[in-house]
Amino acid sequence: MKQLQIILLTLLVMGLISSCQKEVKEKITLDVSLIDTTFDPANDFFRYANNGWMKKYPLPADESSYGTFNQLRKETSIKVQTLIEELAKGKHEKGTIEQKIGDFYAMGMDSAKIEEQGLAPLKPEFERIASIATIEDVQNQIAHFHLYGIGTTFSFFGSADVKNSDMNIAHIGQGGLGMSDRDYYVNGDERSQELRKAYVAHLEKMLILGGISEEQAKVDAQTIMKIETRLAQASMTRLESRDPNATYNKKTQAEVKELYPNFNWDKYMSNIGLDYTGDINVRQPNFFAEINKMFIDVPVDEWKAYFYWNYFNETANYLTNAIQEQNFDFYGRTMSGSEQMQERWRRVLESTSGALGDAIGQKFSEKYFPAEAKERMVTLVQNLKDALGQRIDNLEWMSEETKIKAKDKLVSMNVKIGYPDKWQDFTNLEVGREAFVLNVLEANKFWKEDNLNEIGKPVDRTEWFFPAHIVNAYYAPTLNEICFPAGILQPPFFYLDGDDAINYGAIGAVIGHEMSHGFDEHGRLYDKEGNLTDWWTEEDSKRFNERTQVLVDQHNKIIIIDSLHADGKLTLGENIADFGGLTISLTAFNNAQKLNPQAELIDGFTPEQRFFLSWGRVWANNIRDKEKIRYTKEDEHPIPENRVNSPLANMPEFHAAFGVEPGDALYLPEDKRASIW
């Protein structure tokens, strides 16, 4: 299993209410008591469906956003915690997976030992950084950091060649920033200016906690900000980086050396233990042109200050309470508006899952994912595939030539459900009782070496990018596959014994969402084998872009807070997938209704109304204003209320189900509605 940060996936970020099999049988219908009839569904369906839920589950102090998906993640975490704590308390033979999971978690929970050790586990690395004397040492340190998963300067990883998707090659990309988006360094808006000031103050406080004198911390903070700003100025925007053609610039190693001669690429490869002479994809050429200059004009002492911060920042969450609190103060409070850190067990569980996720997922799926769930999901996925094929056949705007290739891609789309057929081998991962932070770094190294080992080799299409217990789903364009781990196959997404209306409205729309990513503005650029190639006619591409522009324009008009509008271009892929997934699932639901009609009314709602209510319920959410702002600026997903209301406004079936008429907020005239898949 690869590290998630190095895999180019299209993700459906969400979460749900957890439930064991017995609970599923007890909860086969929607909780209509959470509907708020003081809201008109024709004006604000999100609050009509969810305002009761929003009142019942206010924002916890340790969350910046809290919805049904957070509930499921927390409930799933409790299940996983029970499994892991049993291992942590037991005695297991050294080298067994039980020992590794148990010791990793136990070390993270041993706050007394972490406090006692303080910065001692970091001392050897700090001494290594202090000894840097030449630009050659600087470049050696970059390789050393990369091998241990420390983000610095740029990224280097193995992944598929997007124009030869059966083969893994090396990729280099932008990186090295302490704030989560390059725009925060370069934009002139008030929010960005405030964050820059807060970030420099955070740097100073953290450096002092890291043993730097107050006077030197002020100097180093400015140095770090200067270097990161320079990296940010050379970086692509998030929107630019989403264009697979813009980020595909495959070069021979000789060409890379000629383009960026101030970095010793041969020595770098040697330092990370990589014997590879193949091509390298330079994802952001302008970024590397700037780095090439920086190796000439940035003094060694400034690199040392930057490296000190890289290391301390990456390890902060595994150190003393004071360091973790200061780290949270900026990234949690200032950036997202959270009021307090999550409980230690949740933080440690997340770290353990990141290190040993596949092993944890195996134990989770054995206990909580019944075979019947997989069987029903297989049927649902096939029904959704049939529905999308049916809709492609009926498209009036697409030529027969492109339709044939689109259906070929759909038929070829691989499906993964529940858990993988083979599990990650953790034999080479050493987990000890010396220090929690050192276990984390060893796990980083394990995964990095695992990834580097794939470079120059055929792509393993059986590999999963998420552990089985993760509450999420994905579409991988270079594999042309969709994946639904066991973690997401729980209510309110998937009800093993639920009726068709609620399942098609929830997990059905999720299946359709991931399928639609294969045909969104970027996914459509990949063929049935996952190769980046243009298989559309010129006229069909033009018509597709015209139709998707309707969604862009609709979302650009949505006001998030004050003068901040939604970014229709950044969120286009997700908006296509939400809208497409919902329409495809509705078609599949209608097909199912013809074969097995549901009761006319359940809880006073028609099957069609319950389908839409189920869609709305999975996005129930409370969110802080700071997080709304951060999310809108950084994330390709729209905020939850827009994920509910926006696609519905374009659907005539929704208008009919809830009597939406001219003058209602969700009413769109037919000639203003989007129509894509």
Image (spheres, grey):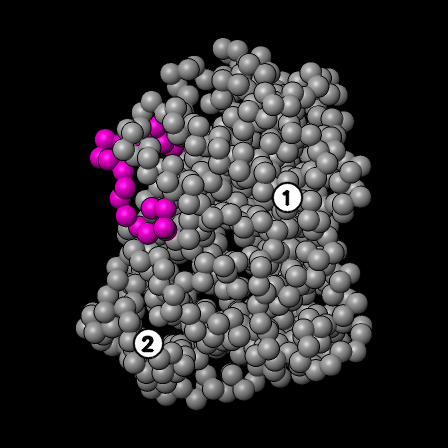
Residue plotted at (63% across, 71% down):
318
**Local secondary structure at mark 1:** helix
The percent position of residue 430, horizontal first and vertical second, equals 61, 80
Q: In the visual, does 385 lie left or right of 160?
A: right
Residue 247, quarter of the rendered image: bottom left
Extreme residue toward the top, this view: 662
The percent position of residue 39, horizontal first and vertical second, equals 65, 20
The percent position of residue 360, horizontal first and vertical second, equals 66, 63
- The residue identified by callout 2 is 276
- Looking at the rendered structure, the number of numbered marks drawn on it comes to 2
* Of 437 and 316, the residue lying toward us: 437
Residue 38, quarter of the rendered image: top right
- Magenta residues span 527-553
Type of amino acid under label 2: Tyr
Q: Residues within 10 Å of mark 2 (few under 14, many from 20)?
A: some
Above or below 424: residue 625: above
Residue plotted at (24% across, 35% down):
537
Type of amino acid under label 1: Glu
The percent position of residue 290, horizontal first and vertical second, equals 27, 66
Q: Residues within 10 Å of mark 1 (few under 14, many from 20)?
A: few
Residue plotted at (42% across, 72% down):
452
Q: In the visual, does 113 lie left or right of 586?
A: right
* Of 530 and 650, the residue lying toward us: 530
Precedes in sequence: disc 1 or disc 2? 2
Q: Which mark is residue 395?
A: none
Q: CA distance from mark 1 to mark 2?
A: 43 Å
Q: In the visual, does 490 lie left or right of 211?
A: right
Residue 539 among magenta residues: yes
Q: Kindly report which numbered mark, 1 or 2, lies closer to the viewer in this rendering.
A: 1
- The residue identified by callout 1 is 375
Residue 574 among magenta residues: no
